[in-house]
Image: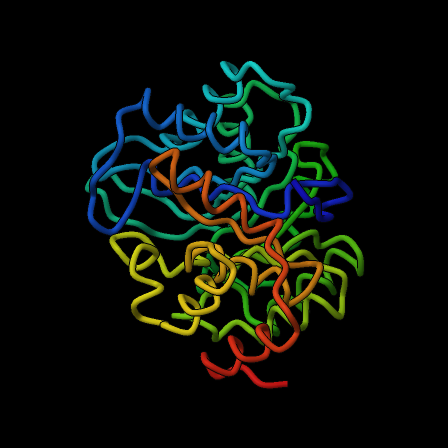
Amino acid sequence: MKQRSLAGRQVSAIGLGAMPLSMNNDRVYPSFEDAVATVHAALDAGVTLIDTADIYAPDGEEMGHNERIVAEAIRTWDGDSSSIFVATKGGITLGEDGGKGRDGSAVYLRSAVEKSLEIFGVDQIQLYQYHRPDRTRVYADIMKNLKSLHDAGLVRAVGISNASVEEIQIALDVLGEGNLASVQNEFSPKHPGSIDELRFCADHDIAFLPWSPLGGTGGGARSVGDRFSVFREVGDAHGVSPQQAVLAWELALGPHVIPIPGARRAASITDSAKAADLELTADEVTRLSKSVGIFE
């Protein structure tokens, strides 16, 4: 598969968003064994970037559910695991009643990282992304807490998720230019609102990882060609699925863009992975962008 740069490493141009294996809108989950098999299918298709988070778990389940799936899949895969790059996230809490909160404190984040390290059986997280802003704290202070994890050697690279342009700039101010590896925001034909953040990342050599790049779980990804017919038309012209057309369009928006489509079936990620080889014309990219309200 074609490669792109992330945190100083080369990773697959299409990653795997592992969340749907443990958390999705219609609450239908594969068995643990089938979930591991889906990750294996992604790796077999050339995917080397896997995105997860400690909070991804079915209702009532423990933190780390999704990380455990990913860890077991890596452990049992019969390929070269040294090529696999895992990005995980922390900062969202799960109460005993299932309610979610946010905590960007130094104590909490260190504890969360240590738990992720234990699950993966490693000494250092390759990419640790702050999941969602804790509005009870100053964002710069949270970035300092992340920097301390990096300085302690617990995480190799730092990223942020669900961040505005202002928050990305704050992260750069605290971490230093060149030390913010990634921004992971929602971005798709359904949700093109993060285009400013995508472009800001291009200007600062930061990888942009669209989450829910096909429109989300619970049917959004499956129906993207119906809701946005121009993507189906472009896909038909190339003899591929509308999902591949969507991902190829996102890749064409910049060499720093690395979509992470979710999957809970092997067939889904196998199809998505092929988008890395789909070359759209400049006119097609412009047409697709304009269809969702993105202009130069």
Residue 45 spot, x, y in % from top left: 54, 33
In this rendering, is residue 137 above or below 147? below
- From the viewer's side, name the closer residue of 265 and 51: 265
**Colour mapping used in the image:** rainbow
Residue 35 spot, x, y in % from top left: 35, 28
Q: Residue at left 21%, top 35%?
A: 60
- The quarter in which the C terminus is drawn is bottom right
Residue 32 spot, x, y in % from top left: 31, 23
- From the viewer's side, name the closer residue of 60 and 225: 225
Q: Judge whether residue 234 can be spotted in this image.
A: yes
Horizontal side, residue 41 vs residue 4: left or right: left
- From the viewer's side, name the closer residue of 272 and 280: 280
Count of numbered marks: 0
In this rendering, is residue 115 above or below 272? above
Q: Residue at left 53%, top 77%?
A: 289
In this rendering, is residue 200 above or below 180? below
Q: Residue at left 48%, top 60%?
A: 133
Horizontal side, residue 224 vs residue 210: left or right: left
Horizontal side, residue 34 vs residue 242: left or right: left
- From the viewer's side, name the closer residue of 176 and 126: 126
Q: Judge whether residue 141 can be spotted in this image.
A: no
Q: Residue at left 53%, top 23%?
A: 120
Quadrant of the rendered image containing residue 279? bottom right
- The quarter in which the N terminus is drawn is top right
In this rendering, is residue 156 above or below 272? above
Residue 7 spot, x, y in % from top left: 73, 45
